[in-house]
Amino acid sequence: MKRKFFFYILVAALVLIDALLLSSPNLLGKVGLMIYKYFYLKNFPRTLATVTILMVAAVLIAEFIALLVRNKRLKRSFGIILLLVFVVLSGFVLYQTIVSFQAWTYAHTGQRFRYGAYLLPCMFMLIFGYKVFTLPVEVEAEIPVDNKPL
């Protein structure tokens, strides 16, 4: 329980850092945000709300899968596969983000904005990867044994 608390404190700190990075593009980045109508990245409170909503959704998905495994609605191996699919999808989003930020339009948004964009899918990978390793272990039912002397 203590590890889980510290993990979510780390996630909260990363959310703040990511929101700070994403809310501070350079001048060309601000113009790009206006042109592409990214209203959810307009200022720090909106960016913080956006990143928080995304991270809460990821945490809820991961916790829901863990709950299904804990209540034996899913086998642990299938839960691990589902979480690994989310890790791979997050890795694909990171790859797409890296490729997108090499294009001319996004390449001039500033280093902080770029690092904030890279951090977001990494946080998804962190949440789903953490849950893979902390997924509840299935306990086999014990067969009662009579302790009567022979």
Image (cartoon, grey):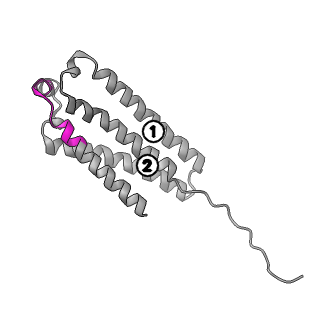
- Image quarter in which the N terminus is found: bottom left
Q: Is residue 7 left or right of residue 66?
A: left
Q: How far across and down, in percent of the image, does residue 127 sit?
A: 40, 46
Residue visible at 19% across and 42% down in the picture = 20
Q: Main secondary structure of the magenta part?
A: helix
Instruction: Work out whether 5 lies above or below 87.
Output: below
Q: CA distance from mark 2 to mark 1?
A: 9 Å
Q: Nearer the viewer, residue 10 or 136?
A: 10
Q: Is residue 6 left or right of residue 70?
A: left
Q: How far across and down, in percent of the image, does residue 24 sit?
A: 15, 35
- The magenta segment: 18-32
- Look at the image and say whether residue 31 sits in the magenta stretch: yes
Which picture quadrant has residue 6?
bottom left
Which badge, 2 or 1, comes first in the chain's sequence? 2
Which picture quadrant has residue 123?
top left
Q: Which mark is residue 62?
A: 2
- At label 2, the amino acid type is Ala
- Image quarter in which the C terminus is found: bottom right
Is there a contact, CB below 8 Å, between mark 2 and mark 1? yes
User: Which residue is farthest front?
Assistant: 111
Instruction: Work out whether 2 lies above or below 65.
Output: below
- At label 1, the amino acid type is Phe
Give the labeled residue for mark 1: 86
Residue visible at 45% across and 38% down in the picture = 87
Instruction: Work out whether 27 lies above or below 5.
Output: above
